Amino acid sequence: MSNNRLWKRKLQDKINEHNGQHGRKAKGVSHKTMQERASSLFRSFGLLRRLGYQIDPSNLGGTHIQVLVDYWTSNARVADRCRQHGVDMLERPHSSTYIQQQLSFLRVYAGAWIGKPGMVRPLAHYVDDPARFQRSYTATQDRSWEGNAVEFKRIVEKVAAIDARVAAQLALLLAFGLRRKEALMFMPHGAVVDREHVPGSQHPSDRYAVFLRIERGTKGGRLRFVAIRNDEQRAALEMALPFAPYPSSHLGHPGLSLQQSLKRFDNVLRKAGVTRKQLGVTAHGLRHQFAQGLHVELTDVHAPVRGGDACADPEVLKAALLEIARQLGHNRPSIACAYLGSPARPSQPAPQSGSGKEGGA
C-alpha cells in the first residue's frame, strides 16, 4: 500500500481550490472560517496517519470518520490502535461542540470537495450514547453583567477614560444586543428605519414602530432589525454618532484594520478589568443582558436563568422566544435559550377524579 508521502501537498491543493467557498451556498466564507477549516483538515488527516491510515486525501471514507470520532470521544474501540501506533488516548473526550465543528468541516470536505455527499453522518450515528454528546443550547449560568453584580455605568465610564470610542461600541452591545464585530462595523447614519421600511421577510413585530438595521459584521451576513424601544437605546446611538462623522463612517478605529480594531477593543476591556477572571463577565455578557431585558418586557417575568417564574401563557412565551431570537440574529426560538435558560412549564392542576376533564382554566 502506498505511503502517500505527498498527502500534505495534495490536501493543500484541495484547500487552495475549494476553501474559499461555502459548503452549501453559492457564496464565499470568512477568512477565519477558511483558517479554521484548513487547520481542522490537516489535524484530522494527520491524526489518521498517526493511527496507521496512510490514505490519500481523496480516499477519505466512512471508516476513517468513525475512527476519528472514536478518538475524539475517548471510545475504547480505538484503544488498541492507539497502543499499536504509540498514540496517547485523550484523558477526557472533546466537547460535543468541538466534535460537531470537526464533523462539519469534514462534511463540507467530503461532499463538496471530493464528491462524497452524505458520507459524513450526524454525530449520533458514531457514538454509543448520543445523549452524552448532545449539544446543548440552553444556558445554565447567568452570563449577564447585571446577574453578576457588575454595574454597566461604572464600567463604561472606566472604559471611556481609556478609549471613548470603545465605550461607545460597548454601549451598543447592551442597547441592541450586538456582537463586538457588529458594533465595530456598525454605520449609524441611515441605520434607523420606520417599521414600514422593514422588509416583510424580516417579520417586524407590530408592537414596535422604529428599528435599527444591522447587517455588517453579522454571522453569515444575515440582515436583521432590532427594535428601538427605550431612551437607553437612543442614548447609545447618540453616543456613537460623534465617532462616525460621515454617512459612510463606521465605529471602527480610523486607520486600523478590522482585526486591529477588534484587538484594540479586547485590550481596552482587559485594561479596564473586564475579564471573566476579574469580574466574572465578558463583553458578550451584555448581549445576554439585552436578551434577558427583552424577555421581561415581552413576558412580564424574569428569564429562567435569572430564577424567573414560568410564563403563564405558553403562546406568549413562544412568541417572545421567537422575537428575542430574531432580534439577536437567529431564526430558531430555541437559540434564545442559550441566553435565557430553559423555560419551565407552568404546573398544571391534577385532573379531577371522574370529571373526564383537566382541572384549571
Image (cartoon, rainbow, N blue to C red):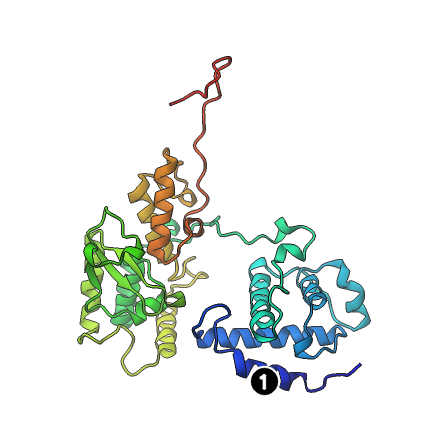
Coordinates of residue 176 in the picture (x, y in percent): 29, 58
Residue underneath mark 1: 13
- Quadrant of the image occupied by residue 197: bottom left
Q: Amino acid at mark 1?
A: Asp
Identify the residue shown where x is 29% and y is 83%: 255
Task: State whether residue 278 appears in this view.
Answer: yes
Vertically, is 146 above or below 185? Answer: above
Coordinates of residue 269 in the picture (x, y in percent): 36, 68
The residue nearer to you, when weighing 199 against 233, is: 199
Task: State whether residue 146 appears in this view.
Answer: no
Secondary structure category for the residue under label 1: helix
- Quadrant of the image occupied by residue 257: bottom left
Identify the residue shown where x is 46% and y is 61%: 277
The residue nearer to you, when weighing 265 against 65, is: 65
From the image, which quarter does the N terminus lie in?
bottom right
- Quadrant of the image occupied by residue 52: bottom right
Q: Residues within 10 Å of mark 1 (few under 14, many from 20)?
A: few
